Image (cartoon, rainbow, N blue to C red):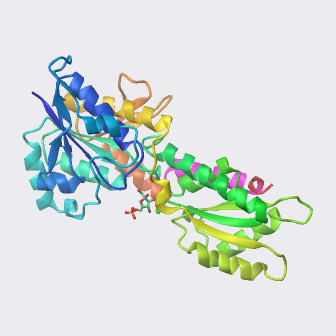
């Protein structure tokens, strides 16, 4: 009987469990056993796995998904556990993992930038097919329109901003809301536009602390201008902007003191944004990438990532018109470019934001 292994790695993201469920069910229907690796690459090195398929004599493939997979498929987090595994950067530990994979027919890695880098290295060091599924709320993975968890995270941020808006309007206050995204401002930018925010602060804009203070003060001044009937100012700040929210707010208050009477508050959403049940979109994409990943691994493809690219994209099309696969080397190159700002996608995002910025506070 063929056996695949699967692991989730890096920051958890909503949709990981839905991808696991899809993979296990598809594999079971093809009579393929699935082993779940505990806690990412740590479990692969240490050989900690458990069967995610159970014997089901009446099912077409003689196998079915275990109860955990079935029950937790709609939940956030990852039922396999996750980790950022420093040991996996070392060749000797990857050699142990490669040794364990020898007896298997494929490995699917569900995770973000660091996890896919690990998958790429491992693929060049072992003959077992290795396939990736992009999962990171930050939407910072190259060659895919989105990653698992992004849609859920954005919806969570919008819900929080709407709630904060209730309080802001009640007290006529300005709020600076910080959202996750250490290296990528995507969540901040996309949520700011969708929440009708008055401004957005991204690491990619390269503002100094003084420039940030000036920009926020100006956003507040403009939005609360006397000739306008505004009671809420919302500024979304990406985590990657290194000035802490509280310091920024204090400095802006000092700058505005005397000129206008305004209360400013800071809210850091932090890990709140990473949890929660996946939205329909994340579950749907998880299902389709999960199916494609199983078929790719069983077909012997290796060093590839399944990508969500509707309606058209480069790469090699699969039987699903929205799912393509790309070589992990190309994915990682594009990921670097997304993060260092040289990717046309990042340039386009920033340019779009620039053209929108003057309209945001109106
Ligand atoms: O998963 C990516 C991410 O959400 C970043 O946006 C954030 O900076 C980081 O994870 C936080 O990671 P940790 O949970 O390890 O502190």
Residue 10: quadrant of the picture: bottom left
On the image, the x and y values in percent for residue 317 come to 37, 27
In the rendered image, the vertical position of residue 299 relative to residue 143, given as above or below: above
On the image, the x and y values in percent for residue 36 come to 21, 43
Q: Quadrant of the C terminus?
A: bottom right
* Principal secondary structure, stretch drawn in magenta: helix
Q: Quadrant of the N terminus?
A: top left
Tell me if 45 is positioned left or right of 115 in this view: left
Tell me if 305 is positioned left or right of 336 in this view: left
Q: Nearer the viewer, residue 96 or 124?
A: 96
Tell me if 138 is positioned left or right of 71 in this view: right
Q: Quadrant of ligand 1?
A: bottom left
In the rendered image, the vertical position of residue 60 relative to residue 103, given as above or below: above
In the rendered image, the vertical position of residue 2 relative to residue 87, given as above or below: above
Residue at image location 74% in from the left, 54% down from the top: 360
Residue 287: quadrant of the picture: top left
On the image, the x and y values in percent for residue 252 come to 70, 77
Residue 45: quadrant of the picture: bottom left
On the image, the x and y values in percent for residue 250 come to 66, 79
Magenta-drawn stretch contains 346: yes
In the rendered image, the vertical position of residue 17 relative to residue 178, given as above or below: above
Please report the bounds of the magenta region as a residue range.
342-358
Q: Nearer the viewer, residue 342 or 93?
A: 93
Magenta-drawn stretch contains 185: no
Residue at image location 20% in from the left, 29% down from the top: 298
The reply to whether residue 256 is in sight is: yes
The reply to whether residue 326 is in sight is: no
Residue at image location 40% in from the left, 46% down from the top: 76
């Amino acid at each position: 009987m063929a056996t695949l292994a699967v692991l989730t790695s890096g920051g958890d993201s909503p949709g990981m469990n839905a991808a696991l469920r899809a993979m296990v069910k598809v594999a079971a229907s093809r009579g393929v056993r699935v082993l779940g690796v505990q806690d990412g690459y740590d479990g692969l090195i240490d050989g900690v796995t458990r069967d995610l398929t159970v014997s089901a004599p009446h099912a077409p493939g003689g196998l079915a998904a275990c109860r955990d997979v079935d029950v937790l498929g709609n939940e956030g987090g990852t039922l396999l556990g996750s980790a950022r595994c420093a040991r996996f950067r070392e060749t000797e530990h990857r050699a142990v993992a490669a040794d364990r994979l020898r007896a298997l027919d494929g490995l699917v890695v569900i995770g973000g930038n660091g996890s896919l880098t690990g998958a790429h290295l491992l693929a060049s060091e072992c003959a077992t097919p290795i396939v990736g599924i992009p999962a990171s709320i930050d939407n910072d993975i190259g060659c895919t329109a989105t990653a698992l968890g992004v849609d859920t995270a954005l919806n969570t941020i919008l819900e929080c901003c709407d709630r904060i808006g209730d309080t802001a309007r009640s007290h006529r206050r300005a709020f600076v809301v910080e959202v996750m995204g250490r290296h990528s401002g995507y969540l901040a930018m996309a949520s700011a536009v969708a929440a009708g925010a008055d401004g957005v602060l991204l690491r990619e804009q390269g503002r100094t602390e003084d420039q940030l203070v000036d920009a926020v003060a100006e956003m507040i001044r403009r939005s609360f201008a006397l000739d306008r009937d505004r009671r809420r100012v919302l500024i979304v700040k990406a985590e990657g902007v290194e000035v802490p929210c509280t310091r920024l707010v204090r400095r802006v208050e000092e700058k505005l003191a005397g000129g206008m009477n305004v209360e400013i508050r800071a809210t850091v959403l932090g890990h709140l944004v990473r949890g929660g049940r996946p939205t329909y979109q994340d579950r749907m994409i998880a299902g389709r990438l999960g199916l494609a990943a199983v078929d790719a691994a069983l077909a012997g493809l290796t060093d590839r990532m399944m990508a969500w690219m509707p309606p058209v994209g480069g790469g090699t099309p699969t039987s699903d018109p929205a799912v393509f696969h790309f070589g992990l080397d190309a994915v990682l190159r594009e990921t670097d470019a997304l993060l260092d700002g040289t990717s046309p996608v990042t340039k386009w995002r920033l340019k779009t934001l620039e053209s929108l910025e003057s309209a945001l506070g109106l």
